[in-house]
Amino acid sequence: MGGELDADTRLVQDAILRLVNSTIQPRSAEYDANAQFPRANLTLLAEQGFMAMTAPVEYGGAGLSYLAQTVVVEALAFGCPATAVIYEVHNSLHTEAVWRYGTDAQKANWIPKLSDGTAIGAFALTEAEAGSDAADLSSMAYPVAGGYRLTGRKMFISSAGEAERYLVFARLPATAGREGITAFMVDRDTPGVSFGRPLEKMGLHASKTAEMVLEDVFVAVGDRLGSEGQGYEIALTLLDGGRIGIAAQACGMLAAALARSRRYAMERKQFGQPISRFEGVQFKLADMATDLYAARLMTYEAARRRNDRDIRVRAAMAKVFASEAVVRHALAAIQVHGGYGYIRDYGVERILRDGKVTEIYEGTSEVMRLIIASSLLHSTEEALWKV
């Protein structure tokens, strides 16, 4: 469902679904219950060649399409949403940063480790007072001999303390707004780097989220990514791809809601017949399937057009539609299951817990609508036909 895939992408999808169904999904509930970081899943994905999928082959990546990576994110979210978000951040927001903006030496040094699982990558942009307004950063990067000294605090960092490498954004002295924001690669074990306690979240319990603290952290010039002042541009470009990844996560969880609801409706009997024969249940399943089809079409199309000039609005549309669909249909899945849907053993309550954050992280639904509206209001009337 959701658009035809080319032969190579179909092979990738078949391979990841086999891995998810055989190994990743069966241990997902345990990871969630114990809030255990799924390191074994990431190691397995690296061994099977799913890391650094879009990075150039000559630097140790797989050289595959963004669509291929997108179907991997979707399949992982179907089986283990926490693994999916860790994987998506590692690939879309960290590894992609290296191959898009790194020097040849940086690519040669960093991508092989990101590909073989030696290093998991994280993304450190958000701050306590700089969420949707990403330009309002207070973390500072002070130039010193041979590099910079970073000081500041980052909030809501996925894989905090677990990832080995962090893409950190900080501003240069005497700058404001977008001006002066610069990107740096920081190792977890660098002196001055520390992390707060894992935050107790509504969902995605196996994905560690915490504050990252930078106290006079030295970063060499060779670990700066891009040029001084290019950080804001880098962050927004990466978030365009990240939002496609979030839409893919939502599609995977919506597919799980539909699969579990369909199976339960066909097995559960009331009034002498399966509840799948009741119109009220059938309509819920039909709406789930329809929205899943539409969400996949939008997400796959955005992935195919990752490098187009209008990707920002396409990614925003895919994210807002898919994320709101998964929350809406997670509630419907619970309703289909009745009282059992409220129980953890049946798995649908977790889809609601895990799915809700897709409306929030990497740009809230409200911010997505601002992006879409801005595009509409600044386009010529003729250009609207292309939306």
Image: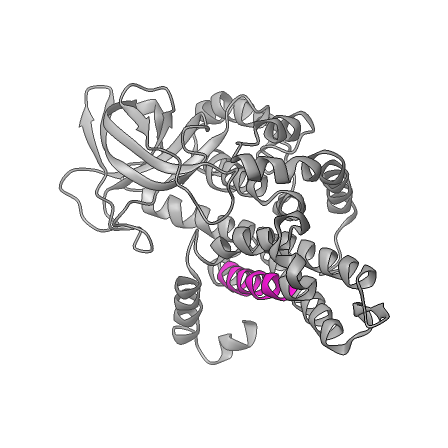
Given the current orientation, which residue lies at the most extreme front position? Answer: 271
The picture places residue 199, in percent across and down from the top left corner, at 39, 40
Q: Nearer the viewer, residue 202 or 173?
A: 202
Given the current orientation, which residue lies at the most extreme bottom position? Answer: 381
Q: Which residue lies at the image location 67% right of the left edge and 44% below the top edge?
A: 79
The picture places residue 289, in percent across and down from the top left corner, at 71, 66
Q: Nearer the viewer, residue 187 or 240?
A: 187
Tell me where the magenta segment starts and ends, as one range. Answer: 315-333
The picture places residue 104, in percent across and down from the top left corner, at 47, 26
Q: Quadrant of the C terminus?
A: bottom right
Q: Quadrant of the N terminus?
A: bottom right
As displayed, is residue 254 above or below residue 289?
above
Secondary structure mostly seen in magenta is helix
As displayed, is residue 286 above or below residue 267?
below
- In the picture, measured across the screen, residue 195 lies left or right of residue 35, that is left
Work out whether residue 307 can be spotted.
no
As displayed, is residue 180 above or below residue 165?
below
Work out whether residue 342 can be spotted.
yes
Count of marks overlaid on the render? 0
Q: Which residue lies at the image location 55% right of the left edge and 49% below the top edge?
A: 245
As displayed, is residue 123 above or below residue 363?
above
Q: Nearer the viewer, residue 59 or 112?
A: 112
Q: Which residue lies at the image location 22% right of the left edge and 51% below the top edge?
A: 177
The part of the image, by quadrant, that contains residue 222 is top left
- In the picture, measured across the screen, residue 130 lies left or right of residue 342, that is left
